[in-house]
Image: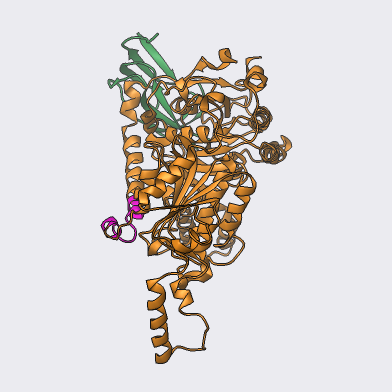
Amino acid sequence: MRPYFEKMTEFGRALKKGRIKSTEENLNSIKKIEKDVADEVNRVKLAGFPEEKINARGQMTVWQRLEYLVDPGTWCPLHTLYNPMNNVEGTTNVIDGIGKISGKWAVIIGFDNKVMAGAWLPGQSENILRVTDLSKRLNIPLIWLINCSGAKLTEQEKFYANRRGAGTPFFRHAELEQFGIPVLAGIYGTNPAGGGYQSISPTILFAHKNCNIAVGGVGIVSGMAPKGEFNLEAAEEIIEKAKQFRAKPPGSVNIHHDETGFFRYVFEDETGVLEGLKDYMKDMPAYHPKFYRVAEPKEPRFSIDDLYRLIPLNPKRVYDFDEVLARLVDSSEHMEFRPDYGPEVYAGLCKIDGFLVACIGNRQEYLGKNYPEYADYPGMGGKLYRQGLIKMNEFVTLCGRDRIPIVWLQDSSGLDVGDAAEKAELLGLAQGLVYSIQQTDIPMMLLLLRKGTASAHYLMGGPTANRHNAFTLGTAASEIYVMHGETAAVATYSRRLVKEKEAGRPLEPIIEKMNKLAKDYHEKSRPLFCAENGLIDEIVPIHDLRKYLVAFAGAAYQNPKSICPHHHLILPRIIKG
Amino acid sequence: MAKEIAAPLAGRVFQLKIKAGDTVEAEEEILVIEAMKMETPVFVPWDGTIRKVMVKEGDEVAEDDILAVVDEEYIEV
């Protein structure tokens, strides 16, 4: 199949002087938002005790551990700003992402030992479940840096119980193990109760000499047997017991290495733990990239920084999707699927880091007087029509047959509406696409270039496709809402306006409410809101987008659950004809 | 040589960014047409000088209507 992939059709063209001149403001506006996002990321990094204080205790921070553990240049953080319960700590207290360790991709997560010694906080279990889902979807090892002091007891009602509560990740670890996905854990510090299960639930435990893991820690052991109230006598008893257990906390290395043998290894230094993980990662199941690559990896022919000029921040602004894609894929080459059908949808085969990847995106331009063919009005890109939906159904299904991971690049205002669209079967074709995705068991990711709106947001590989979407990335231009805020205000208040008018009452109070609703929609659709609430998994600076695509492609092909030999691929043959 | 810039679609001239006599560079945005809730920028394909602007902001235009005439410096091949 070398002739198919070694040299594919080139697309895209270099920006000219006039375009550069006209897009200066757009570039500056996007960079300003990226600066705001970077400030927020920095705030999370600085949460809790300062690094110097942790280091003075002889410990590394989670950030230092990650830096030591992960191969340079490969770290792709996820969920950095995720804080769905609006914790005062400003974080769910776990740091995670994808990166390479000893040359192999892994999902990596660690407790932030600067914040309440890595305690469970509200929203944390949801964060962890996203991470275990990611490891399962990509079929790659999950690496834990455990340093978990247990629950933040003053807020336990928010996260301890429930279907997706703090204990659920332990079941997910077991599930990963059932699927043959290793969960490796480096263990530091004091890990009582929930921290104990965090530590014991992985597959192999690498312990630092000062760590301990236990069913209950000092606080619990010294305070058991409730007496109905506290008094001075009880307080003295607590003090005595606490001193005793603090001197010798339960579950230390001499118990769980020397007696139980739960700890496979114990290391003198913190870095020794990380070296142990690195050493084991060398032996994790993984194909050599040459097994799956269809060509030598190559950078795009155009600078990725052109995207600051090509992706308009203004959501109403039309742009050339193909030029965007040409800045993301190897050599700016592709094989487009059915280019003469469903023009609002781009579907094609591209290479990322030498791996074959399917890309699906929304073209944005005017589609001509005669499209959609079923209506007496012209079509506009960004919307989905009958042909585009059929094309995506076909393409996704063929990708499943050929085992080709899918990158969705979404910027859609939704489906065409009205009786003509209903007669053209859009509703059925849209749910048909959901069916096509569901029966296509391959990793997918979503890059939300700009608008994620209406049903198009979940139809086009959005995070609601839980079993398929590995992660969803946003940009500074991303925005997510069920519909534009002004549309929502009209939908909510139009009948009320009619009533008020007919009753001869002033319209201003209703207009004020409409403006308030539209403003609220705007504020709750911004990238920072989306990241804090988990609507996207990370806001990625445009300059770094390809790095995430490389991570996705490499991870998806590291140890896939099924194989389609290159010479059995049907999709490139269908495209070639 | 003078070349005409035609409207890529029908709509309303939302923003006009040029006037006669302006020097423009290839792919510079010269106006924006609003149609179907979207804003479509119109770019001049060549370096040149604006000889004549045929529309003003707020004008409704049909597809292929002439928007401006540009004296091009050269034609790219």
Residue A44 in the image: x percent, y percent?
36, 54
**Residue A123 visible in image:** no
Quadrant position of residue A541: top left
Quadrant position of residue A72: top left
The correct choice, above or below, for A348 with respect to A192 in the image is above
The correct choice, above or below, for A16 with respect to A481 in the image is above
The correct choice, above or below, for A127 with respect to A74 in the image is below
Which chain is tinted green? B
Residue A85 in the image: x percent, y percent?
47, 62
Residue A356 in the image: x percent, y percent?
55, 25
The correct choice, above or below, for A387 with respect to A422 in the image is above
In the foreground, A24 or B48: A24
Question: Does residue A52 show up magenta in the picture?
Answer: yes
In the foreground, A378 or A229: A229
* Left or right placement of residue A352 versus residue A26 in this view: right
Which chain is tinted orange? A
Q: Quadrant of the image for the C terminus of chain A?
A: top right
Q: Does the magenta stretch mainly form a helix, a strand or a loop?
A: helix
Q: Residue at x 63, y 15 (%)?
A: A576
Residue extent of the magenta highlight: A40-55
Q: Which color scheme did the rendering employ for the protein?
A: by chain
Question: Does residue A217 show up magenta in the picture?
Answer: no
Q: Residue at x 49, y 44 (%)?
A: A107
In the foreground, A421 or A472: A472
Q: Residue at x 39, y 13 (%)?
A: B3
